[in-house]
Amino acid sequence: MSSLLALWIFVAMAGLGFSAHGEDKKPEGFKIVSLDPSLTEVLFSLNLGEYVVGTSDLSDHPEAAKKIARVGRYGKPDVEKILLLKPTHIVVLKEGINLVKNIFEKAGLRQITLMSRDLKDFESLVAKLGDEFNRVKEAKKLLRTWSENWHRIQALKKLNRKKHPRVLIQVDRNPLVMAGRETFISSALETCGVANALSPQAGYLKSSVENLVETKPDVIIVMQMSEESRAQIKEFWHTLPNFRQTPLLNVSASDLGRLSPRFPKFIESICRQIRSGILTAEKTP
Amino acid sequence: MISSGALHQRPSRAFFLISLLLGLSVACSFFVGSGAVGLKAFFERSDQVSHFIIWNLRFPRTMSCFAVGFALGLSGRLLQSLLQNPLAEPYTLGISGGATLGAVGAIFFVIEPFTYTVPGGALIGSVLATLLLLYFSRISHLWRSRMLVLMGLLISLFCGSLVTLFLTWMRPHELQHALAWMMGQVGTERDQMWPVLLIVGAVSWIWAYKNSRDLDALLLGEELAVGSGFRLTAIRRNVIVIVAILTALSVSIAGLIGFVGLLAPHFAETLSNTIRHRTSLLLSGFCGAALLLLSDLIGRALGGGEELPVGGIIAVIGAPTLIYLMLRQKTENEYE
């Protein structure tokens, strides 16, 4: 009897063991192509990096993203290369897919088109990707961190309260393109009380030098998109009247030019430098 | 280059050569691309991806190149006869200027563009430019070739200046879209429109073939043709309308592609040694198709993973060829 009982217990335990084994997470089977570098960063932040099989050429963060197969340039995806990877999902921003947007759906792939124009869009984007790829917990954690970052940036308004710094944000040099209000960079800086010297002009503005001369900003933020050296940029701005003593803050376009999980970190750094007043024309970082 | 017909016309040989070239180009077009696809993928669905690539991407692209090249080649032949100018091409009458303005305007103004927004804009723009040309020509009774060319140039300049303004105001992704269109582009969803253009091209050729005698009369010169009883005004109007429709549809599908309409008739003439329209119309169409197919193949093969714009490739081939033709024309004129 006791041996029969022992046998039943053994069988029951074995059965439990098998079913537990059966409840192990099955491979999810995603094969994701990301056609935007900011989306690639978000996917990695949601622990989906191992499922990304193809990216556009500017996906350079994190390091592992550089090793993923390239499937065309931003805005010009190579449809054949993408299809040959046999992906399950294509993740893309709305502006990056004008000419081929119906082809992937026709090929039976799931295309997720997202918007990323401002900070609110980023939150929706993360939530949507979290839902789509069963990463709801990771998405909530990312958004929590995101929100905490912005609260911390907002608290920087108290730093040097009397100061109301104004900035110019150069996006590109040739042609000269400045970021006005309502761009995500400008909106982000407003969180810590840094105003846009071009206000109330909004959007990305192809400016003439004449338009800028009267603005008298406290700092000029230069996003380096081209090979132009820092010395050349400094020479350009410091030969202009009213800007000779204006500090320049050089930032990488891949850091500040995309809405990614890292974005608040760079904004915080810029806000601290500007609000603390450590920047001078002679000590340009 | 409207030279007199030579004794040794070679239309059969010309058709054979160009058909061979077309056949090879079409065949290669199915095999050139980002990924290798085998012959089996043509017929078997076992490799679904390769089968999709061939029949949903490369096939429409190939047919699109054929249809656009044919339309532009045919248009070029018609225009060079109409205007008695060997350097005339479909863009001489301002139609491409109108198409560009329409396309760029669509990109600029339409917030949520769908697949046919830009080609629709191009079509509307080119139709409006044509109507403008016809209207000014009619009210001024200025149907002579030189005046048509001048009118077309002025329309082009006007449209071009508006395009420049729009490009200045565009956001970066809109600008990228507009510039890609202006450089000439196949391999997009617009390739699906190829059946429409092919049918219109075929119907246009049939009309032109039936009226080839009247078109041959244009080669006599305006005064002689009128004196011989040909109704030039009606022919001019019909040719302009046909060229406008073919150009508008071509531009809607593939954007701005220059030089095809200019070069194709000259290649046809060189191959066949005749400018009689019964031969040269179809041959010019085929030469245009071959030129565009070859340029697209070169663009895909040399791009190194990135496709070179077909309009750019043709310009690289076209400009030196045009210079050579101009110098040759100058030499011929000196000897006449």
Image (tube, coloured by chain):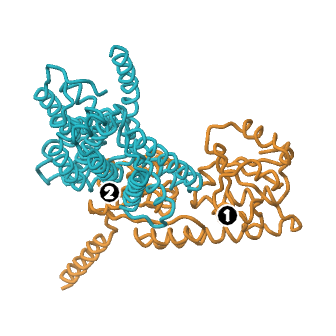
Which sits in the foreground, A58 or A203?
A: A203
Q: Which residue is mark 1?
A: A202
Q: CA distance from mark 1 to mark 2?
A: 39 Å
Residue bearing mark 2: A87
Residue at the image point whose x is 83% and y is 54% from the top: A216
Under mark 2, the amino acid is Pro
Q: Nearer the viewer, residue B260 or B135?
A: B135
Horizontal and vertical percent position of residue A104: 32, 59
Which residue is most to the right?
A162
The chain drawn cyan is chain what? B
Q: Chain under label 2?
A: A
> Helix, strand, or loop for circle 2?
loop
- The residue carrying pointer 2 sits among few (fewer than 14), some (14 to 19) or many (20 or more) residues within 10 Å by Cα, namely many
Q: Residue at x 17, y 39 (%)?
A: B213
User: Three-letter amino acid code at disc 1?
Assistant: Ala
Is disc 2 on the same chain as disc 1? yes
Percent x, y for residue B70?
24, 42
Q: Nearer the observer, disc 1 or disc 2?
A: 1
